[in-house]
Amino acid sequence: MTSFIAPGATLGVMGGGQLGRMFVHAAQQMGYSTAVLDADPASPAGLVARHHIQADYLDEQGLAQLMQLSAAITTEFENVPAHALKMLGAHRPVAPVAQAVAVCQDRAAEKQHFAGCNVPCAPHAVIEDASQISAVPDSLFPGILKTTRLGYDGKGQMRVATRADLPVAWASLGSVSAVLEQQLPLAYEVSVIVARSAAGQVVHFPLQQNLHRGGILAVTQVPAPDLTVAVQQRAIDAAERVAESLGYVGVLCVEFFVLKDGSLVANEMAPRPHNSGHYSVDACDLSQFDLQVRTMTGAPLVAPRLHSPAVMLNLLGDLWFASDEAAPREPDWAAVLALPGVHLHLYGKATPRRARKMGHLTVTAAIAEQARVVALQAAAVLGLPAF
Ligand code: ATP
Ligand code: MG
C-alpha cells in the first residue's frame, strides 16, 4: 500500500495532452510540483508543468529523468507503452499499473475482462488473420469493425453492412487485429467514472449522458436526462466490479450503451480521467483530476458531490473554420462568456485542426433545464448543432 505522499512532492505524468494539463492544474492547486513527459515542445500539459521532459514514451533517458523527479507517476494517455509503465513501476508508485492499462489498450482483452466481471458487452468476434473472416457469425451484421489497438475518437473503425463488405473493410483498416461488433440499437449512451485507492476505497461520480457526433464526444449532460435509477445502479456496480477485479488504483471510466430494450452494455473503458468527466471541474466539489491526484498520492478518497447540474460542450477545431475560408479565425468567445454559468476551458493548442479537441465549455446552473437552455444558446453562438 502506498503511504501518503504529501504536498510539496513532485508528481509525474506520462503524456502532455489536455487531460495531463488538467491533472497538473489539480496537483498544483494542492501544492504539488509536476513533471510531464511528452515529446511535443508545445504540449498542453508541458506548457503549464514545472518540469517538461521532451522525450518519447520509450526514451530511456527521458523515463529515467521522470522517475528521478517524481515521487509517484500517473498517465493521461492510455496508449503509453505498458512496458514503460512497468519499468517506472519497479522504482516508483505508478497508478494505474501497467497491467491494468494493458487491458484497456486492447479491445479484445477489455471485452474478455468485462465478461469475466459479469458485465455484458456487444456480441463480437476477434479477427486476427484473414482465415477468421469467414468464421464470423451472420448475427454480427450489420456491424462495426474496430482495430483492437490504438483507436480513439472514432478512428480505426468502419461500419460493415454485410458479410460481403468485411474483407474490404478489414483491408482498409490495415489488416491488423480487429474486433467486429454487432451494431446495437442504442437508446442513449452513458459513462461512469470511478476512483479506487490503494487501500481499496472506491468512489464514483454520477452518471454522465454522452452524445457523440462522427464518433467523437460532443455533449455531456449531468444528471443524465434519460437515465433510470435501475440502470444507474447497474452501471455503477458494473464499473466498480471492473475496477475491483483489476485491483485498480486511479481513475477509471467505463462507457456504456443503454439499448432500446433498457439493457446495459459496456462499450469500452479508459484507465484515466475521461472527456465525459470534464464537467466535474466546475460542477462537483472534487473533480476527476483531484481524485487522480488523491489516488496516486495515497490520500483518502471521499465521494465527489455534484453541486450543480452541468452541460459540457466539446470545442473541436472545426469551430475555427466556420466558413470555407482557408485561414482559421477565433470563435466569438466574448459572446459565449456573456452567458451565465459558462466556464470556458481552452487547452493552449496553437494550431486548430478539424476534429482536434481544442477545449470545452461547461455550463452550470441551479437546475438542469437552465444549464441546458444556456448550453443551447452557447451552441447557437458558436455554430454548433442543437442537442
Ligand atoms: P473514444 O475513445 O473517443 O471514446 P473510440 O474511437 O474508442 O472512441 P468507440 O467508443 O468504440 O470509439 O465508439 C464510438 C461511438 O460509436 C460510440 O460512442 C457509439 O456512439 C458508436 N458505437 C460504437 N460501437 C457501437 C456498437 N457496437 N453499436 C452501436 N453504436 C456503436
Ligand atoms: Mg468510446
Image: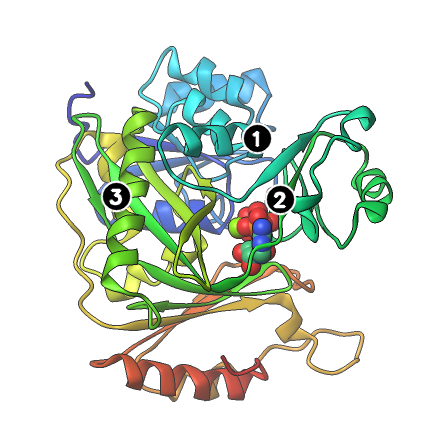
As drawn, the label of residue 181 is 2
Image spot of residue 40 (x, y percent): 61, 41
Q: Which residue is mark 3?
A: 237
Mark 2: few, some, or many residues within 10 Å (few <14, many ≥20)?
Answer: many
Q: Earlier in the sequence, mark 3 or mark 2?
A: 2
Q: Of the residues shown, which amino acid type is indicated by label 3? A: Asp
| SS at badge 3 | helix
Q: Earlier in the sequence, mark 1 or mark 2?
A: 1
| SS at badge 2 | strand
Q: Residue at x 25, y 43 (%)?
A: 237
- Inter-mark Cα distance, 3 to 2: 24 Å
Q: Of the residues shown, which amino acid type is indicated by label 2? A: Glu
Q: Residue at x 31, y 42 (%)?
A: 238
Q: Residue at x 43, y 41 (%)?
A: 120
Q: Earlier in the sequence, mark 3 or mark 1?
A: 1
Q: Of the residues shown, which amino acid type is indicated by label 1? A: Ala
As drawn, the label of residue 320 is none
Q: Residue at x 56, y 16 (%)?
A: 60
As drawn, the label of residue 108 is 1
- Inter-mark Cα distance, 1 to 2: 11 Å
Image spot of residue 268 (x, y percent): 49, 43
Q: In this orientation, which residue lies closer to the viewer: 13 or 98?
A: 98
